[in-house]
Every structure is written in structure tokens, then in C-alpha cells.
Image: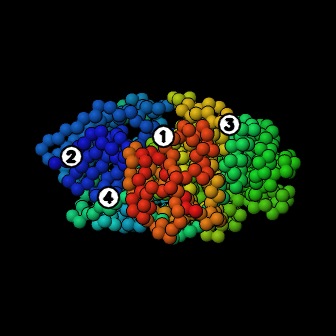
Amino acid sequence: MPIIKSSIEYDGNSGGFLIEGRNFSFILDNGKLRYFSSSEEELIRMIHIAVRDENWMTINPQISDLQIDTIKNKSFVFYSADFVSGNIDFTVRVKIEIQDDEMTFSFTGRANKTFLRNRIGICVLHPLNTCTNIICEVERPDGTGYSGNFPELISPHQPFTDIQAMHWSTPGNSMLKLFFKGDVFETEDQRNWGDASFKTYSTPLEIPIPVLVEKATEINQSVELKFIIPDNKKTSPAYFRIEKDLFDFPQIGFSIPSEIPHTQATSVCLQNLNPDYLSIESGFENKWQQELLKKLTLAKSLEKEVELAIIVKDLPYPPDDFFPVVSSSGVQVRNFLLIAWSDKIIKEEVYKNYSTALLRNFGSIPIGCGTRFHFSEINRESLPEKNPSFISFPLNPQVHADDSETIIENLQAFPDITNSARHLYPEIPLHINRLTLRYPFNPDPAGTDRYKRADGLPWTVDHRQWQFFYAQWILPALSKLKDAEQVTICDTHGLNGLFSEQAVAGIPESENAVWLFPAYLIFFEMAHFKPTQIYKTVSGNPFRVEGLFLKNDAGEYLLMLSNFCSVPLEIKVSGISDFKSECGEKFLSAENLTEALGKPGSWVGNHYNPCSSNMAEMVKLAANSCQLYRWK
């Protein structure tokens, strides 16, 4: 009989229902079915209903009327979901039926008014760790079939199409069979957009969008799952392993924001962070000269090189006064990045015009190109230059979903993205510009509506930027981008930055009359350590614990671990037997965060205590913390 436990904790975080079949289990959390697994092998990442409007905006549902029944050897879960935002008003009733190692997820939906949509339907997310390079058998609606692999390198287009059923076996010898009804499904490689999964969804993208959904339209879909699980499943303790592979640590920079004042306090905070460079964007809009000169002046006062990202809109050539503005600032330009405002990749003729003018006025400064959208554009389109000085694209973890669990999960896609970029352009340096929590704009707008938020914040702002979560998240994000030569993180300051010169709710005022965000302390600590190399690391449960292991030119080592869970954890750290010197430790959590933000000098630097853990055995991590270990 299926077992249902309410108010459980999964990955240390409270909420949801643990639902157990005979040999598998999953979490029901706010309408999403997460982490189908057997023992510790993940089978399916998620099943959910996606509603996306004509701008590809994801509409989050309001869940209500949850009912759970058990009849003999079957369990049933029912709930309603209302998808309401902008012009969208769509209600569904969901039914989940579980018996032994089989489950059916189905819904009936109804449009409460007429609206445009790009997608409505069931989505199944397949995890990378148990699907990549695995053979999948696909059955078409006409009964014919074919086979293919979940791709290792990121596929620019759908690896599987015309799906009615699919089945595959995991590395742990579990077999999964899925049967779809209600539409034709296909599978895409979500790593193109920064997600750590393959996604099977409907309706096929070859059908023109947006689609008009008339009021009272009904939509019905279902997916039936059958699991065949071997009896010899084994569990293993949580671990964090340091590999022997050593890489150069990427050059780290921050972007100077527009329309936010720069004061002496800004300079002091940035001096503490000591970035390798500052990134400046210029799009030649109204009063661009004053804005560009203001940013260049800040960089000059800090004696920092700049990456100058030129966002090309309508001008086929750079304006004549651009060159004297840059030259008169006295700033050392380390490189120019040419990207288009609306085109996925800058047009070849425009790139040639701009690069020729830049070379004529500035000499042999490196000039790169790329996109301001997603890696998918690099993966699908041709660059305007065969051998640019570098390629560049941004990364963010919430193109398809914005919950914290998904943001943590999607870290696992970052190494695959950089690896695929290397495969496409093996001899060209890779730059990430920028690495942000939230996408800064809607890349496929069907209109001009920016979707006013209930909290009144700008569309580009994520409140987790100034919370402890971002400090924890940025550590593994950097670890997984070790293949990049240069990474521009976020804004220097403001709500999308590392500190603010205006009060922010929940953040104490620091001794310098600014409001520092928790991630500021992480980058301040790294600036003090001065890393030059980074080790490859592997987490046994990356949804709970992740980290970053660094080395500097003084022969010192710094291990920074993030416990994302709301409970303490014990993990085995392996691969550190070569580090025999004395180890110091310190932590950052709710217990000491307020004091550290108020007086950062009391936490950053050599404020380490003798290590209380035997690092070759089990390490105790405080709940929701960053734990730091330093060897001298």
C-alpha cells in the first residue's frame, strides 16, 4: 500500500508530502512532484503542469482543495491549481493515482477567459546524473519507434520528437516507462537555458505560437509511469570529494550599474572586494556619454581595468564621440564585448563595422562577441567572426522556474554548458557575462508589458540577492565555472549587487554607513585569500551540500562549504589527505550574520579557530550555513 507522510522535511527543508510507492518515492510540493527516487538514485526530477504566456512567462499556480484518499491498495491525491497572471486565467483539477510501482498523473483544465499562450501541459524533467548518455526507446503515436541517447554534449535542438511513450534504464538498472495522452510530446535539452535537466513537454515547438485559447476551452492530459526497480539497491553516506584536477581560477569582475549613485562608500566597499576588473555596458541611449564617463571615472579611481560591453541597437557604426569619451577617462580597457540588443547574435556586417572602428582607435585590444540571451544562441547560431578574441554569454538558473530548489538544482548544468562551449570553440577563451540569479529581461517579448510585481520591485530584482541564500549559492556556481577564463558576477551595488547605499529590509547598517549583503562577505574573504587556482569537487548530494576549494600563490588552501538545509548535517570530506598543515575553521549563519555584516572586519580574514573536525572523517555543518576551512 502506498504511504503518504505530511509535513515532511526533504533535503532538510520543511514542507510538502512524502509519497512512497512500493519501491519508489517522491515529494509533492505546491503542485510539483519532485525527486522521484529509489534508494538514493534519482529517477525523475519533476512532473508538473506548465502554463506559459505569449511572452514565455511562467505562471506560478495557487494550489487549493488538496485531498488524499487510500482505497485498498491504491492511493489517490487530488488538488486544484489556479494559474492567474496578466491575461492568463486557467484552472486545473489534478488527479494522481498510485499503486505498487505505477503512477498516473492527469489533469483537466478550463480557460476562465480568452487568452494567448505559448504552452499549457504536462512537463517531465529528466535528471542529468541518471540520464545523460543513456539510450532511450521512443514510441510514436502511429506505433512506430526509434531509439536515441539523452545527449552528453548539449543538443541545440530536440533529441526526441513525436513522443507517445518512452522508456530507458538508469545506471542503477532501474527501468522507467512513460506513456503520454492528450497531446504529442517532445524532449528538449534544458541545459541550453541553464537548467540541469532534459524536459519532455507538449505542444511541439514546430506548431506556431502564440496560440489563442478561447474561454471555456478544456484541456486534458496524462502521463502514466511504470517503474521496474531491482532489489539490490544500496545507500551511501553523504560526502564531498576533492579531486586531483587543478585549474586556473577565473578572473572575477563585477558590473557597474546604471542610474545608481557612486559615492566614496562605493569606492571603499569595492576596494575591499578587489575585483580583477569592472564591467561597463554602453548602449548609446539618451545621455549615454555622461553615464559612460561616470562609470569610467569610478573604475579609474579604483585603478581597475574594464571590460567595455557595447550593446548594439540601431547604430550600424559606433558614434564618433564614443572614442574620445573612453580615451579621455584614462581607463585601461582590457577587452571589448560586442553584443546585439534584439538579435540573438550580432550581425556579421555590424560586428565588422564596430570591430574595425575599435581596432583603428584603440589598437590590438581583444574584441569578443556572443549573446545577451542564453547559451542556446551560441549553440544554435554562427558567430559573426570565426576567431574572435573570446566568446561570451550570460548564465542564470531560473529561466523556467524561480523556486530556490530549482536554483540549487540547476548548478549541475553549469559544467556541461562550459564543456559544450569548449567543444564548439576549443581554441577560443570563454567569458561569462553575467552570472545572475534572475534573468534581467524577457528575451522573447510579444508586447511591452513588463509585468508589475506585487512587491513593487523591478522585474530584474530577486530578493534572494541580499539574503543568505545567494552567499551559499555563489560558491558552487564559481566552482562549476572553473573552465571559464573570466566571469562577471553581478552588479557592484544596488539591489542586484553586493551592497546598497540605501536601507534594505532585514540588512543591518554596517560601520561604513552602507548595507552589506551576505555575499559581500564571501567575496571579501576571497579577496583576502587571493585565489589563483581551483580544484574540481564532487558532492554526493548537491541539493544539500556544495562548495568551492581554492589555492593561492602562498600555498594556502581554502575550502568553503554551503549547507542549504535547515538542519545540521554530517558529511565525509575526502581527498584532503595531502593537506597535513594546521587547519582553521569558521562559519557564517544566522547566528553570527548580523554582527559580521555590521562589522565585516571582525569576520573576514584571519579570524579562524582551530579546526574541531577530523576532516578525513565526518564534518559537522551547521544548519543553513557557510563553513570555511583554511590550511596554511
Q: Amino acid at mark 2?
A: Ile
Q: Residue at x 71, y 47 (%)?
A: 271
Label 2 crowding class (10 Å Cα cut-off): few <14, some 14-19, many 20+?
Answer: some
The answer to whether residue 143 shows anywhere in this view is: no
In the picture provided, is 262 more to the left or to the right than 563?
A: right
Mark 3 element type:
loop
The answer to whether residue 5 shows anywhere in this view is: yes
- Label 2 belongs to which residue? 3
Q: Measure how far apart labels 3 and 4 are at the Cα level.
A: 48 Å
Single out the mark in the foreground, 2 or 3.
Answer: 3
Label 4 crowding class (10 Å Cα cut-off): few <14, some 14-19, many 20+?
Answer: some
Q: Amino acid at mark 3?
A: Asn
Q: Measure how far apart labels 2 and 1 are at the Cα level.
A: 35 Å
- Label 1 belongs to which residue? 590
Q: Measure how far apart labels 4 and 2 are at the Cα level.
A: 18 Å
Instruction: Report x, y in % for residue 571.
Output: 39, 57
- Label 3 belongs to which residue? 512
Instruction: Report x, y in % for residue 244.
Output: 51, 70
Mark 1 element type:
loop
- Kindly indicate the quadrant of the structure image that contains residue 60: top left
Q: Quadrant of the C terminus?
A: bottom right
- Label 4 belongs to which residue? 40
Residues tagged 1 and 4 counted as in contact (Cβ below 8 A): no
Q: Measure how far apart labels 1 and 4 are at the Cα level.
A: 30 Å
Single out the mark in the foreground, 1 or 4.
Answer: 1
Instruction: Report x, y in % for residue 292.
Output: 78, 43
Q: Earlier in the sequence, mark 4 or mark 2?
A: 2
Q: Nearer the viewer, residue 224 or 23?
A: 23
Q: Residue furthest left?
A: 72
Q: Amino acid at mark 4?
A: Glu
